[in-house]
Amino acid sequence: MGDTITNSTTDINPTTDINPTTDINPTTDINPTTDINPTTDINTITPALRHDLVVLDMAGTTVADGGLVERAFERAAERLGVEPGSADHAAKLQYVRDTMGESKISVFRHLFGTEDLARRANTAFEEAYGELVDGGLIAPLPGARETIEQLRAEGRTVVLTTGFARVTQDAILDALGWRDLADLTLCPADAGGRGRPYPDMVLAAFLRTGAVDDVRRTVVVGDTAYDMLSGQRSGAGIVAGVLTGAHDRAALTAHGATHVLGSIAELPALLGPLAQLTPESAA
C-alpha cells in the first residue's frame, strides 16, 4: 500500500520536538516593547488627541437659563403643597440648586419620597418650565450657536444633552430655532433613564454617533459639578467646565474638570491646538 503510518508516540515527541523553552521564547520572539508599541501602533489608527465627539450640556452651558429652573421648581412645589417662604420650601430649593445638572425626576424622587409624588412634581415642573420658555424667557448664551457651527465645520460631531424630559428639551430647541443645529440631542430617557452624574448620556452619544473609535477622544462640557462627574465617569479625554451657569471654578475643578473656560465660546480655541499635537509632541 506504500503509505507511511505516523506513530504519535514515536514520531512526534512534544518533549523533544516542540520545546517551548527553545523553540518559542516569549521574551525574544514576541517582544511587547519592540513588536507591539501601543503609542505608535494605536496612534497610526487614532490620531493623538484629536477630539471629534463633543457632548454639550444645554441650560447654563449653551443656553442662558436665567433662573428658569428655580422659578419652575417654585411653581411645581407650590402645586404640591410646599408653602412658599417656609423652611421646607427653602431646604428643597437649596437642594435643587446643589444638584443642578442632575436628572430632574431623580431630584424630585429625593425631595418628595414616593414615586407618585416625584412624578407629579416632575410633570408640574416640566409644565411650568415649558410655560416660561413659551413666554420667551430663554436665549442662547453668547457664541453658543457660532461655536457649535464651527465645531461641526471642523468635522466634529456635536451632541446636545439635558437633564430635562424630552418634551422640555424639544420646547427649548424650538424656541431657539436649534432643531437642526447639532448632530444629535439626548435626554435621560434616550440613554436608559439615568441622567447625570451617571455617564450614560455621554456613552449613548459615543455609541449612537460612532463619531470616534475611542471614548478618550470625547469632549464633555457643562456648567455643573454633575456634568464634570458624568464626563469623568465616561472616560472622556477632556471634561471642561464653563463659568456661565450654576457652579463656580472650585466646584467644577473639585468634581473632575480638566479645564475651566469662561464660556462655551472659548471651546474651539481649546480644541484647536490640541488637535494639532502628534504622538511625539504629546509625549
Image (spheres, grey):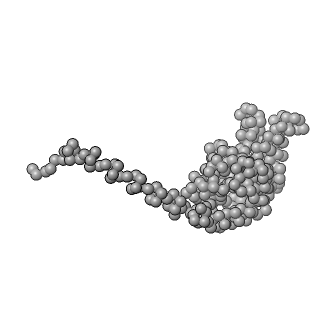
Residue 4 rendering spot, x and y as whole percentages: 15, 50
| 12 sits left or right of 38 in the view | left
Can the viewer see residue 158 in this picture?
Answer: yes
Depicted 114 relative to depicted 20: above or below = above
Within the image, what quadrant is residue 219 found in? bottom right
Q: Which residue appears at 84% of the width and 46% of the height? A: 71
Q: Which of the image's four quarters has the C terminus?
A: bottom right
Q: How many labels does the image show?
A: 0
Residue 239 rendering spot, x and y as whole percentages: 68, 54
Q: Which of 153 and 277 is in front in this view?
A: 277
Depicted 171 relative to depicted 41: above or below = above
Furthest residue toward top: 114
Q: Which residue appears at 74% of the width and 48% of the height? A: 254
Residue 249 rendering spot, x and y as whole percentages: 78, 53
Q: Which residue appears at 82% of the width and 49% of the height? A: 68
Can the viewer see residue 135 in this picture?
Answer: no
Furthest residue toward right: 85
| 70 sits left or right of 56 in the view | right
Q: Which of 202 and 48 is in front in this view?
A: 48
Within the image, what quadrant is residue 29 found in? bottom left
Q: Which residue appears at 67% of the width and 66% of the height? A: 272
| 23 sits left or right of 221 in the view | left
